[in-house]
Image (tube, rainbow, N blue to C red):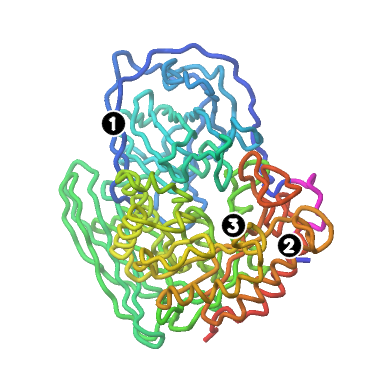
Amino acid sequence: MPMGLKRTFASTSTSLDHRQRGQGRRRGSGRPPSTLSPVRSCRRIAFACGLAVLVLGAQLTAGASAAPTAPDGGRPAARTLYADGPSGRFLVDGTWLRRLDPSDVGQRAGWQRQAAAVGWDEVSVPDAWNARDESVASYLGSVAWYRRDLRLPAGSARRSWVLRFESVNYRATIWLNGRRLATHAGAYLPFELRLPRRILRRTGVNRIVLRVDSRRTSSDFPPAKTDARGRPLGGWWNYGGILREVYLRAIDDVDIAALSVSTELPCARCSATVRWDAELRNLGARPRTVTVSARWGARRLTLGRATLGPGVTAHVGRALRVANPHLWSPSDPHLYDASVRVAAGSRTLQRFTRKVGVRSVKVTGGRLLLNGQPLNLRGVGLQEDSRAHGFAIDNAVRDRQLGWARELGSSIIRAHYPLHPHTLELADREGVLVWSEVPVYQVETEELAKSAVRDAAVEVLRTSILTNRDHPSVLLWAIGNELSSRPGPAQAAYISAAVAVARQLDPGRPVGIAVGAIPGVGCQSDYAPLDVIGLNDYFGWYPGPAGASADRDLLSGYLDEMRACYPKQALMISEFGAEANRDGPVEERGTYAFQSDFAAYHLDVYATKGWLSGAIWWALQEFRVRPAWDGGNPWPSPPLHQKGVVTFDGAPKPAFATLQRLFRATRQFDAR
């Protein structure tokens, strides 16, 4: 029995996520005060670790915000759920208030300035408000409001403060003490906004209010789509809410607005070059002269000095040659401390923790190489889902998921969106590679034909790269999943623009895409800019157009055709899988026996293709997809996606042992 897995398949098992959360302790109903004037939408610029800063908004209309009367949330704790990043972070967890707004009347009714707590429910953040609702209305999205009262941490008089959200789905509007600050669109990536001194209460209670709208359009990522019968489509459940944690961040005048620590390794036995690039910004009211220093393991070095006037930004950087570096690899995931310190004289203004690994990733002769050695990876797809809390999971669930992947013998994981920072740090430490993808998921060609949509998709990729490029576990940047199998001008324009941005921001990593494995499509020249092509293989499960992929015996020949089409690019199986939810004969689709046989057959075929760089089973664990989902299963359990080899409630299916046996029998990388 794999470690940490339950011994039964019972669907009544307890959820993986055992947090005790407030389940809607009701406060009654409230009355609407006055509303606010309009505000500009935010625009993004590079911020700490490549994060987004939001441009602050318009002024308050006549009438001051009423004093808060809801219970004081207290001072946030000086702790984080992941290690890398700037000092001065305070976790804004615990009890928040939430109010559902299905008719979208809250803003007109003035909920952003409502003094009383009546009409609001107590919940714990992170929170997905529809985690227990599997209705069509839940999936299509709605509006909800969150608010939290808090006092600034002690010693805050001289500091500037930033509010950071790790992920809000999908459109967020943020108020502070009744004044509208900014808006943000998009999930799965963090954003930050500076709290204006003129609004922030240094000694009193501050109120943060969010309006969150999870209704999506055809131009969002992932997009809202329907089938010919008007039923909603999509690849995972649309959970609305504050899906990851919230932080306050203290800044003592000078902030590290962005930090990159990149490594270059020309060959496995060569010396490495480490490059620091720190972008500094003076948020104070007077000039500051600072010294920037760094660590490289036990070594200390000075990166440089800078004098910054108020509001001025400057870059400080340095390159370091490292002889005989200890390389990072799946078998030996060595990490160096590359942290940075900013000081004015003897006073430390800020520290930025950063752990990096020295390794190279290249595509040569159609093979994906790590430290010069060819890869033949095996792994699983992840969804950050749980029965009780949806995507608002905690680190215990993340640890459990990666632990299961390791028990299988996985050396790579994949998701359709950027993973939580804790998962990436864990992958860094455990030596698990990451196919890092942005949620440009099944976007229709007519949408990609719009330059605004392409630009927005590239911006999501840009933010993902700036946020996560220092993680040695990130193997490649994937720019999308299952776009049209015949790209055409619109998709070609997106591919070209996305690859160009990835090369500019992170020239040391390959760029890839995942496409549907559909026979008869032929070679596509529009994929030429890409380094890696992932094939989503469902031969013998989904029939495909005109039954083209119904016969699994056609898989081997199809893979050979793809190798002939793309001899210079690395090819991987980015997905393969079959649903299973019951006992029954091996010939019957949807049985545990069929799933195990499907896994063994496909992995046996892959083993005959020495040029394949890996294969990823989709997915590790069951998750919610959408109403009426069947996944090709004649006896489905909608909305559950049941290709997982672990049930939604944490029980292993027989295919877990099949994958484990075959994954562990595969030489996935050279341990040298």
3D distance between C-alphas at marks 1 and 3: 46 Å
User: Which is nearer the eye, 428 or 350?
Assistant: 428
Task: Kindly identify the residue that appears in the image at 54 percent across and 71 percent down.
Answer: 431
Task: Kindly identify the residue that appears in the image at 29 percent across and 14 percent down.
Answer: 62
Residue hosting label 3 = 544
Q: Is residue 199 left or right of residue 103?
A: left
3D distance between C-alphas at marks 2 and 1: 51 Å
Q: Quadrant of residue 227?
A: top right
Outermost residue, front direction?
546
Residue type, numbered disc 3: Gly
x and y, in percent, of residue 615 in the image: 58, 70
x and y, in percent, of residue 171 in the image: 43, 35
Task: Kindly identify the residue that appears in the image at 72 percent across and 53 percent down.
Answer: 647
- Asked which secondary structure carries label 2, the reply is helix
Q: Between label 2 and label 1, give the one nearer the viewer.
A: 2
User: Which is nearer the eye, 195 or 652?
Assistant: 652
Q: Between label 2 and label 3, give the one nearer the viewer.
A: 3
Outermost residue, right direction?
584
Q: Is residue 399 left or right of residue 445?
A: right
The tag on residue 635 is none
x and y, in percent, of residue 320 in the image: 29, 76
Q: Is residue 282 left or right of residue 267?
A: left
x and y, in percent, of residue 250 in the image: 36, 44
Task: Kindly identify the residue that appears in the image at 44 percent across and 61 percent down.
Answer: 478
- Asked which secondary structure carries label 3, the reply is loop
Residue hosting label 2 = 595
Residue type, numbered disc 1: Arg
The magenta span reads 5-14
Is residue 457 visible to the viewer in this orientation of the structure?
yes
